[in-house]
Amino acid sequence: MAVMKKKGEREVPAMSTTSLPDVVYIILFFFMLSTSMRDQELLVRYRLPEATEVQKLEKKSLVSYIHVGVPILSMQAKYGTAPLIQLNDSYKTTQDILDFVAGERDKMNENDRALMTICLKADGNTKMGMIADVKQELRRANALKISYASSKLLSY
């Protein structure tokens, strides 16, 4: 039986890194496509009320949001601690809801305008008078399909 001897120390061959930039760009491209950007900056704080019968919205592209709650800490010096209405990226009054709904309808296709839903995200401690005022303005704007955001109650 023959014994094989090693001749000198062998080195590990160099690894080719020419395809590494391609892999990095593919990964970057994948994350850019799969990540969704936030539509608007939240200027109010709210804790959603809890509910037992919760349904998910099917077509979120047809939903416009109205946020009602206490301003964030950085805005409380200017606006106080009373609940405010946020439409898109600014604080508004109930009189501005008509223009908001009209603007949101103009952004949609003709066929989807009838399916438009307004989602009201309000703090659980907000007075019902403010919610009633918002609902009254939505009636004037002929936005009759309203959804109320809530968190699911875990125990019954």
Image: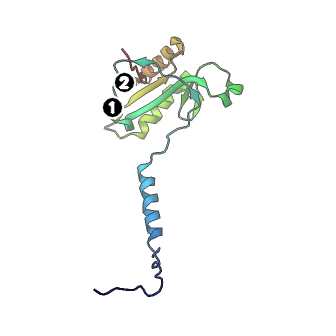
| Sooner in the amino-acid sequence: mark 1 or mark 2 | 1
Q: CA distance from mark 1 to mark 2?
A: 8 Å
- Judging depth in this view, the residue of 89 and 20 nearest the camera is 20
Tell me if mark 1 has few (under 14), some (14-19) or many (20+) residues whose alpha carbon lies within 10 angstroms of its own. Answer: few
- Mark 1 belongs to which amino acid? Leu
State the quadrant of the C terminus.
top left
Residue at position x 31%, y 38% in the image: 111
Q: Position of residue 11 (x, y in %)?
A: 47, 80
Residue at position x 36%, y 18% in the image: 52
Q: Which mark is residue 17?
A: none
State the residue lying farthest toward the front. Answer: 1
Query: Number of callouts in the render?
Result: 2
- Judging depth in this view, the residue of 30 and 82 nearest the camera is 30
Above or below, 141 relative to 1: above
Q: Which residue is mark 1?
A: 115
Q: Left or right: where does residue 65 sit relative to residue 45?
A: left
Q: Which residue is mark 2?
A: 145
- Under circle 1, the secondary element is helix
- Judging depth in this view, the residue of 54 and 63 nearest the camera is 54
Q: Position of residue 109 (x, y in %)?
A: 35, 41
